[in-house]
Amino acid sequence: MSAFLKPFNLLIIVNLLISCFALSSEEIKEIPNQHGLILKKVYGEHNIPLELEETGRVDTYKGDAEKYSLESPFGVYLAYDNNILIGAQAIDHTLKNDTLMGSVTTDILDTYQGKGYGTKLRKATGEFIRDTYFGKNVVIDSKQGISSSPLTFLHSDNEWMWGENMPSLMTALKAGYQIACIGSSSTLQMLLTQEERIKAGLWSEKRTKYLTEIGRMLSDPSSYFKEGFKQNLSDLLQALDLTQETDIVTFFRLWEKAFNDSIA
């Protein structure tokens, strides 16, 4: 290679490095938070760490990382502590009856469960989205075309497993989510919102306390016949408003659970 061409080759290499760095920086955005985490929003399935394969939902994370830009509230958030990946959250969008919401999936890696990271991650993303996007129009580019609607709430299909997975429920409650109803497949439908008209239909602290007590007892079948279990179940049933669709769903889920367990 001639001495004349060397500077040009060097220039090409430098430009490639700059381009690669710019591309990388445009695919990862650090999200400020007050919970001691390094929180990063990522774009592109190649930015999904291999460690998330243990969650069994790596395809969900890859799909959402490809679907949403860094400027969108939706997509994938990775949580680190001291530069070690501890968990992730994927937020997909649903637009129904002109109401835009984010559906949240949260995973903490097995090694780091039970150390408060679930609460920190839910708080960090929830506060960021609340302060940045709630009530503001968000552009959605989907198969149905481009639309713009205000983001109303975040929704979590919480896998509490009738008390067997109480930590998942407790971290969501600590992060500000409230229960809407008991759903199918041993889940709780939970929402995070600022809108008072929606909050009015969510569970009060008293009703939530009845359910958490029931959950703790359901995780121990020997508690079924204890007075405390029957009292909490009675209090929760009496607190339901059967003019509300969500409370009707809750009533039938409780009845179904009690009936199935009684004949098991």
Image (cartoon, rainbow, N blue to C red):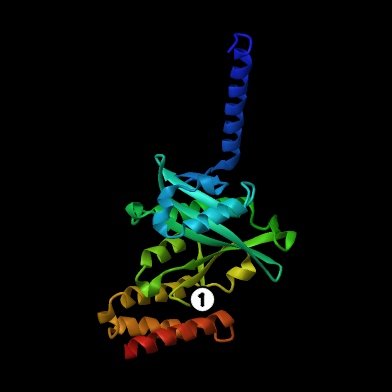
Q: Residue at 55%, 46% (x, y): give it.
A: 42
Tell how many labels. Answer: 1
Tell me if 134 is positioned left or right of 166 in this view: right
Pick the front one: 107 or 236: 107
Q: Most extreme residue toward the left, as rendered?
A: 222
Q: Using the image, determine if residue 43 lies above or below residue 92.
A: above
> Residue 38, position in %: x, y?
47, 42
Q: Using the image, determine if residue 223 lies above or below residue 116.
A: below
> Residue 75, position in %: x, y?
57, 53
Pick the front one: 238 or 105: 105
Asked if one can make out residue 194 in the rendered structure from this viewpoint, the answer is: no
Pick the front one: 185 or 12: 12
Tell me if 10 is positioned left or right of 184 in this view: right
> Residue 256, position in %: x, y?
43, 86
Q: Quadrant of the N terminus?
A: top right
Mark 1 Cα shell of 10 Å, populated few (<14), some (14-19), many (≥20): many
> Residue 37, position in %: x, y?
45, 45
Q: Residue at 37%, 67% (x, y): give it.
A: 166
Name the amino acid, label 1: Cys
Q: Quadrant of residue 170?
A: bottom left
Q: Using the image, determine if residue 207 lies above or below residue 63.
A: below
Tell me if 98 is positioned left or right of 131 in this view: right
Q: Residue at 46%, 52% (x, y): give it.
A: 88
Q: Secondary structure at mark 1?
A: strand
The residue that label 1 is drawn on is 181
Q: Quadrant of the C terminus?
A: bottom left
Q: Most extreme residue toward the front, as rendered?
A: 1
Tell me if 34 is positioned left or right of 98 in this view: left
Q: Residue at 34%, 71% (x, y): give it.
A: 164
Q: Most extreme residue toward the top, as rendered?
A: 3
Asked if one can make out residue 38 in the rendered structure from this viewpoint, the answer is: yes
